[in-house]
Image: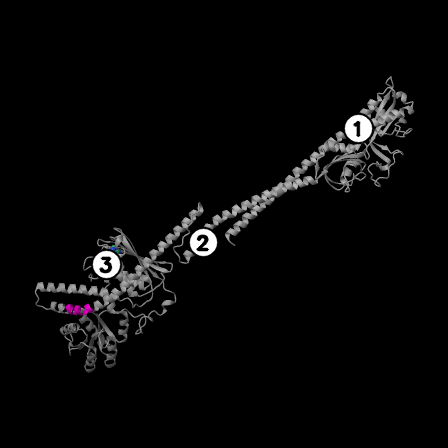
Amino acid sequence: MKPETAPKKILVVDDEAVVCESCRRILIREGYVVDTCSDSRTGLRLAELNHYDAILLDLRMPIVDGVRFLERLREVRPNASVVIITGHASAESNRAFERLGICELIAKPFTPEEVAGAVQRALKAKDES
Amino acid sequence: MTVQFRLTIRFISVILLAGVALSAFTAYHIARVLLEEVQEQVSRDLNAARAVYDSQTEQIELFLNTAALDATLPALLNNPQQAEDLLKALSETGQLDRLCLLDLEGRVVACAANVRMAGHDLSNDPVVRHTFRRGRSVAGTVLVPRLESETSPEVDSDPEADVPIAPDGMFIALAAATPIRDATGETVGLMYGAHILNNRNNLVDAIRAEVFRYRSWKGIHIGTATIFQGPIRVATNLRNDDGSRAIGTTLDDDEVYRAVLIKGDRFDGIAYVVNDWYFTSYEPLRDPDDRIIGALYVGVLRAPFMETRNTAIGVFLAIVTGVVVLILVLLIAATRQVLHPIERIVEMTGRVAGGDLTARVGIRPSGEMGRLCRAVDAMADAVAEREEQLELATRRQITQSEKLASIGRLAAGIAHEINNPLTGVLTFTSLLRSKPNLDEQDRADLDLVIRETTRVRNIVRGLLDFARESHSRKEALNINEVVHQATWLLHNQKEFCEISMHEQLAEDLPLVYGDRNQLQQVVLNLALNACEAMPDGGTLTIISRAEGEEVVLSIQDTGHGIPREDLEKIFEPFYTTKPVGKGTGLGLSVTYGILQQHGATLGVKSEIGKGSTFTVRLPIAAPAGPASPASADTPASATPADTPPPAASSDAPPPGSAGAT
Ligand SMILES: Nc1ncnc2c1ncn2[C@@H]1O[C@H](COP(=O)(O)OP(=O)(O)O)[C@@H](O)[C@H]1O
């Protein structure tokens, strides 16, 4: 499934450059427009300035912790689809994500198919709602 | 009350009772035998006394018979004057108080000069009458009237020794009569003689001498003899309190009186005589007409025998008491000996209970007690050893869980660090791989990189599973459901199609309180290990049952088993016997960690070549406990408990299956 009209815009926030770059390459190949940034403060500003269809977010970021980042993001972009990239899924974060409207969860390290599938599902869920 | 006290009291009472009974019995018998013996002796003594008495009578008869042979007597019958002198001389020789010649009518013709009896009619005297009737001499005891010349005060008024008493004016006497015959042998008259017994003590004294041989006790003769005239003592060696002879006193004992003087029987028995108790024997004295006119008595003072008896009983009692005391002493010593070890054991067990495991009874008495002591000590040894082992095991367990915790933290850190580079490797290799113009060799190489990287990823995820242990979401759940889910997953693994799986799940199983996902992982890990132990097929059996306060889950396989020396190691992280790429060695440690968090235990039994059984024991949920299961988990939590598990967590494969996906 490829976007037919305007390409969807996606923001990737991860303090690890290699992760950002991986996501960018995977998603570009899928036909998305991708912005990346490796610190959460910049990521938050980018999200305020631009409209992103989906935001991929690493929870274990320095400076602003992923969960805190999410709460702030919800204040400015309550409708954005959020896909969490996590080192490891744990029950407590799962529950926090539900509250914060998380759509999908990707565990690092991921395969390109996992990332593509998760973003696709997140966008679809948003479209339906 | 101590056992010793009770035992001792019981023994003492038994022994005392026995002692008292024995003493009473024996004392009674000593007394009886002794006293009966004396009484019998006294009865025999009476016979002897009687013999003395009778011989005295016979002597008189003999004397008269001899005197009657005098040829001058028939002539003298007609010459009383002349006869008097002869008779007087004879009476002195024969110690006779009466000696007279009677005519055929029984009238006194002549008598000894000192006795004025001429003209007295003696035809009523039984001796005289019987002599006439039988025509030969007769002797016996008779009553003879007191003569005027024989002055006597009234009975009782003056017991002066030399004045004979004469109750009712009569004397009791030994008398004999013999016929006087003339030359032709014709009886012409009678010679009559009598020896008065009243106040004549020589007979009774002779009896005493003859029969009792002057046996004495404390200076008094204990043997006594008495002649009664009717109930009155007329000759006796019994003494009044003042020392005088008890002449003139009467027989007071009613029983004796009736038996002897009225019925004419013998009496043998203890009686109160004059002023003391005697063993007595009485016999009536009868005249030739068989009338009872008096009695003969012998008696032996009872006091010395009582003294003997009392001494005997005393000695006996002393012996018994001594023996009883001795037995008691021995007994108390014996019970001490028995109870001493018991006290030691009580003290020792008290100390052990108080925590001093080095306490021992120590002593070794002989017999059962010794065995008991040895057994108690052996038990204490065993307890101490067990305690030591337990301590060791606990310590080992503590180190084990500490090790797990630190490895968990370490692993988590490392895993996160590895994840990021791995992400890059995986992504870019995949991207490379998807390029269309790759040659066959490159594609195969890239596939290998991807596969190996995926393996690394799985190892890392296993590590993180292992590390993630502090946050679980517990709820009351039925372990059977968990088992169902886990086996459902296994059924879909075509790798295990050779294995037949059985579930023996108890119905109505109590709920346990736990994290569904974690428990499912436990079951999966154990079941996967079981399946992997049976590469050539076999049977996997999962059994659940309730046991007391626990739910027990057994996972049995028929696989290759675990060597004994490996049993401890298998729970250690990274211990695996599986080929590289197959096992991570984390499955059992993760399982162990999860179960520990649930307050559950994991046990294993295994036999080489036959199979292994892993047993999980989960405590059942407290009825009211799990009402709000989510509350304690995280401060950020506000979700209800029935939230479906997030997708990602079901994505994560169980660590034991690493590389199989
Ligand atoms: N059911 C079983 N039968 C035989 N051996 C077993 C069984 N379960 C575990 N083991 C042994 O214990 C080892 C450790 O198991 P585990 O910790 O799960 O790691 P892994 O399965 O990844 O090797 C295994 O390698 C295996 O030798």
For residue B554, what is the image quadrant?
Answer: bottom left
Three-letter amino acid code at the position of disc 2: Val
* Tag 1 secondary structure: helix
Mark nearer the N terminus (3 vs 1): 1
Disc 1 marks a residue whose amino acid type is Thr
User: Is-magenta flag for residue B524?
Assistant: no
Q: Residue B244, relative to residue B346: is it above or below?
A: above
Q: Is residue B227 above or below residue A52?
A: above
Hey, which residue is sitting farthest bottom in the picture? A49
Question: Does label 1 lie on the same chain as label 2?
Answer: yes
Viewer-nearest of discs 3 and 2: 2
Task: Residue B166: give x, y in percent of width and height.
Answer: 85, 36
Q: Which of disc 1 and disc 2 is earlier in sequence?
A: 1
The mark tally for this picture is: 3
Residue on which the image places disc 2: B346
Q: Residue B62's quadrant in the figure?
A: top right
Q: Which mark is residue B607?
A: none
Q: Nearer the viewer, mark 2 or mark 1?
A: 1
Q: Position of residue B77 (x, y in %)?
A: 90, 23
Q: Which residues are magenta?
A: B417-426
Residue B422: image location, x then y, percent: 17, 68
To which residue does mark 1 refer?
Answer: B57
Q: Quadrant of ligand 1?
A: bottom left
Q: Is residue B423 magenta?
A: yes
Q: Earlier in the sequence, mark 3 or mark 2?
A: 2
Amino acid type at image mark 3: Tyr
Chain letter belonging to callout 1: B
Tell me, for residue B575, which label it has, or none.
3
